[in-house]
Amino acid sequence: MSLHRKKSLNDLMGNVATDEHTLKRTLGRGSLIALGIGAIIGAGLFVRTAAAAGEHAGAAVTLSFIVAAVGCAFAGLCYAEFASIIPIAGSAYTYAYATMGELVAWVIGWALVLEYALGAATVSIAWSEYLNKLLADFNVFGDHKGLAYEWCHSPFEFIKDTATGVETSGIINLPALFILALLTLLLIRGTQQSAIVNSVIVVLKVSIVIIFIALGWGFIDAANHTPLMIPADMHDVIQQNGEPFSYKDFWNHGFGGVIAGAGVVFFAFIGFDAVSTAAQEAKNPQKDMPFGILGSLAICTVLYILFSYVLTGVAPFTDFISSGKEASVSFAITKYMAEYTWLAKLITIAILAGFSSVILVMLMGQSRVFYTMSKDGLLPKAFSKLGKYQTPYKSNRMLFLFVGFFAAFIPGDVAGDLTSIGTLFAFILVCAGVLILRKTDPQLKRPFKTPLVPFVPIAGILVCTLMIVGLDIKTQIGSISWMLIGLDIYMLYSLKNSKLHHKAANFSIKPLFNTGIVLSILLAGLAVTHHLLLKRDALGNLLKADDDDTVLLSISLSIAAIHLILFGVKSMMKPAIK
């Protein structure tokens, strides 16, 4: 038996039916849609829209949203089929386990950490930025300033005073840690209470989005939408840290910028799949899960396109590089809609509430994935231990420590792009899973069937892959390094502790070693490619331009070499476990 060993659908459903220590079914159709919208509308819309427009797509960020929405629609249809067949906590991880085997399930479960855990970290960082903006607006600390820069930014961020030339570096992001701790306590208290809080917040932030669209429409300057895409000869823009931002790269202008922008704003759609992680807590999962997934996705897509059109019409996209940054919506209103400054404060409050609901759903989704992986023996039992409120409280506590580290010490744009690539990878595997299950079990009862198979799954795979290619190469390098760490954990712990391991008399682990070797070669190739591209673009200023890249190249090649030796030697010495 190989590492393509799978959990049968009958076993999956039987375990839930007989397990007394399972999650409570408290969520109805309305709660599931609110859960989806709660996760979707947040930092992706209020922060990543401006990042995609300013750095890649310009006013054509509306097209980026359409590209991302198409990919999500294809993946959403595939998610809906799986959610109706396998209404169990664990989302894409569980679907992969039933269709593609344990190794792929582990890989996708590890990738989901990038989606949910780093997604929560990214949004908490944005929450911190908007809180600081609100504190400054209400002049809490005097001089219309918020918290000191060093206490609300990571050590890798700095700001330069253009008047004095003095640079200030961050130390730790305390507000981000605060909101994570608060919402972790709420999740430990119970899912139903969390869902009620989330539903109230959803109504508030959707109302704010609609108000901004309605009022901002009258302030649209047609000149800001011309040209629609960033031209290849666009001049550099000075960022807040005093460094110039160049649009010469293929992915920073024109159609390439639209695709790269789609990869960035894709973060805005993350959340509809989080509905599937709550399948084991839905009252009628077979009927309600597809409704919750597709309904929340459809509502948010319409709002996103309108919102991005208004935002880039009110303010030129270059403002989001030089001034607006994370608090872009409040900045645009304050600068270009002067008579509605009250709205900027109201929107900031609503955005803080909205971000809170996104963090809530992301933390909930990650803890439910860990819960299921622990039940399968791939993670320690502590991750599936339920407290008196029937919630995985130990998992939530450990998750707070992990997410809190990234929120406190890693910049938001780095965490955000890693979140996108992890989610896109999960979407690709879910789409592939539908194709596999249609072939291996065509007679299986499917309460919801993905239409136009194989077109929809294949199109989903292609669109999501295109968005991964459009993301920054550093993000790709980081995600592969993360996957290699995941394979290390699987090899050292999960492989022998898996419940399926004890049922197998003999199985091959060669697929594990082959996967590690391929990822190691890919990591080395990407690192060298990135280094050569920087050399090409930095001719005449090599020493200064390549300082940071040399460190990245050295670390990447070291990780790749260690794993090539590790997996290569093990592949030759021990091809099988008995």
Image: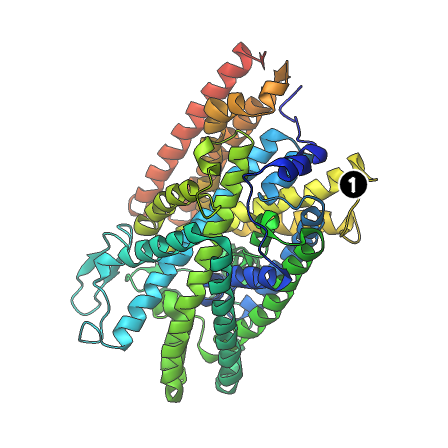
Tell me the residue that label 1 is attached to: 438
Q: Position of residue 37 (x, y in %)?
A: 55, 63
Residue type (three-letter) at the residue carrying disc 1: Arg
Within 10 angstroms of label 1, few (less than 14), some, or many (20 or more) residues?
Answer: some
Using the rendered view, name the quadrant where residue 515 is placed: top right
Can see residue 516? yes
Q: Quadrant of residue 380?
A: top left
Coordinates of residue 35 in the picture (x, y in percent): 55, 60
Q: Residue at x 70, y 32 (%)?
A: 8
* Residue furthest out toward the right: 443
Q: Position of residue 490 (x, y in %)?
A: 50, 27
Looking at the figure, which quarter contains the N terminus?
Answer: top right
Q: Secondary structure at mark 1?
A: helix
Answer yes or no: is residue 227 visible: no
User: Does residue 531 appear to the left or right of 511 in the view shown?
Assistant: left
At horizontal 42% and vertical 44% (from top left) the residue drawn is 393
Give the answer, above or below, for where 147 lies relative to 95.
below
Q: Measured along the vertical axis of the image, is residue 516 above or below residue 14?
A: above
Direction bottom: furthest residue:
339
- Identify the residue at image location x=59%, y=51%: 25
56 or 21, nearer to the observer: 21
Rendered residue at 62%/59% (across/down): 28
